[in-house]
Image (cartoon, helix red, strand yellow):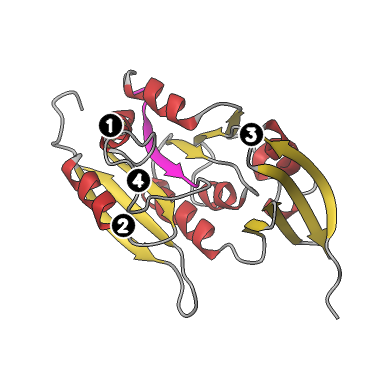
Amino acid sequence: MALPWKVIDKFTIGDEGVLELRQRGEKDFLITVGSQVLMNSMAQRSEIALGELGAARLKDHPAPRVLVGGLGMGITLRAVLDSLPATAEVVVFELNPHILTWCQGPLAELTEGAAADPRVEVKIDDVAKGIQEASKGDSNHRFDAIILDLYRGPHPKTDKKNDPFYGSRAIEQSFKALNPGGTLAIWGENHDGGFIQRLSHGGFSVEFKRVGKGGYCHAVFLASKKRAKSPEA
């Protein structure tokens, strides 16, 4: 018989409802909003793949800089850290300080303390703002990978121009925020041909990877900055 879920902590987020952290057993966690499950610690293969794919080219980089958008349970961050050298710098943007508290507290053992890793700086701020700021900087302020694990991925109803993450303007900002040869990796629920086309038009080489086999599978959009795209690069 399955153990019952226990609510460890909860708080209200605007008009969206109550966000809850639930646990049963030692490492079985859920994050829910209302009746919707946002994250499940036992079903994280796409988040792990996102982190691994996003940081895959940086293992031998002397001092890579990586931006992670969205902390969640810290699963993606853990996969990123496991793919990077000890010299890496990882900047995580998370809107809600409660999520950071969870990752430093009850979820810490789940990720071997990813949020407290000495390579990590967590900023309680909008990741779109972080990308915009990096896009205006020099190579010391740009990133070698931008990895977005957000509440909702790109989809056919995305505003093609003005969406803060998946519109053409946001793609332009991400391109400028990356060093030559850098990677933009984005979690998604389904294939989105329009988004792939926007990435390509924005100067990226794009791969779409469906994660796992059998059942409902989430996906990773993997975009690489073409080195010859911009004279500024």
Q: Which residues are magenta?
A: 139-149
Helix, strand or loop at label 4? It is loop
Q: Is residue 148 magenta?
A: yes
Viewer-nearest of discs 3 and 1: 1
Check if mark 4's residue and mark 1's residue have beta carbons within 8 Å. Answer: no
Instruction: Look at mark 1 in the image and give the residue it sits on.
Output: 169
User: Residue 138's spot in the image, x, y percent?
Assistant: 32, 19
Instruction: Look at mark 2 in the image and give the residue it sits on.
Output: 192
Viewer-nearest of discs 2 and 4: 4
Helix, strand or loop at label 3? It is loop
Cα separation between marks 3 and 2: 36 Å
Q: Is residue 124 above or below residue 9?
A: above
Viewer-nearest of discs 3 and 2: 2
From the viewer's side, name the closer residue of 165 and 28. Answer: 165
Instruction: Look at mark 3 in the image and give the residue it sits on.
Output: 118
Instruction: Look at mark 4 in the image and give the residue it sits on.
Output: 158
User: Residue 200's spot in the image, x, y percent?
Assistant: 19, 47
